[in-house]
Image: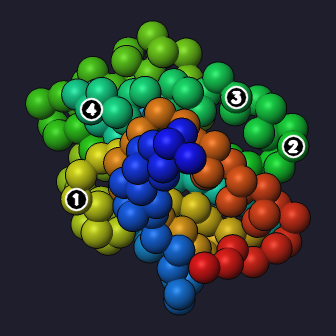
Amino acid sequence: MIKSALFLALLMPVLLSAQLLDNSRPIPSVEIKTLDGKMINTSTFENGGKPIIINFWATWCKPCIAELTNIDEVYEEWIKETGVKVIAISIDDSRNATKVAPFVSGKGWTYEVYSDPNSDFKRALNVNNPPQTFLINGNKEIVWQHNGYQEGSEVELYELVKKLAEGKPLNH
């Protein structure tokens, strides 16, 4: 009984910060940069009808780095099982923008990583504090979002990804 109460107490902040959206909405159309400086539009994000995870992060954000590192450890398995794609969006400002590509290279992350130098995408999705994660369904609609990171919250995220990959709705 004590263990289950402790588990719930630890899990509550994670559950409270996650939000299943009643009305899914499309990914906003915003210009962002590739790590080599080319401009792309977020409306071109594509995954052949399979789920996409969009994660806003920064090089100075320890929880962001922990989350993306933990997902990277299982990412290949996630792709094999669900076809999910992870897209990491750096919100580092212009002072830190040059650090992003070497940082990502040093971590060995295999995600698509982009930079949001003018914070346009961040503003369009009302991102306040990183990490903030959005789950996109096969129709390129945002169906779930989560702010913050605690060790293990990627497990909940993956359960939702599996539901979407199987064509099941996310329930409240």
Residue at the (46%, 70%) spot, across then down: 19
Within-10-Å neighbours for mark 1: few <14, some 14–19, many 20+ = few
Q: CA distance from mark 2 to mark 3?
A: 11 Å
Residue receiving disc 3? 74
Q: Earlier in the sequence, mark 2 or mark 4?
A: 4
Residue at (48, 49) in percent of width and height: 5
Q: Amino acid at mark 2?
A: Glu
**Residue 81, label in figure:** 2
Q: Earlier in the sequence, mark 4 or mark 3?
A: 4
At numbered mark 2, what does the secondary structure look like: helix, strand or loop?
Answer: helix
Identify which amino acid the numbered label 1 is placed on.
Asn
Sequence order check: which comes first, mark 2 or mark 3? 3
Q: Which residue is mark 4?
A: 61
Which residue is at the far bottom? 23
Q: Is residue 166 left or right of residue 58?
A: right
Q: Secondary structure at mark 1?
A: loop
Q: Which residue is mark 1?
A: 128
Which image quadrant for residue 122?
bottom left
Label 1 to label 4: alpha-carbon separation = 13 Å
Kindly report the distance in space between the C-alpha atoms of the residues bearing marks 4 and 3.
21 Å
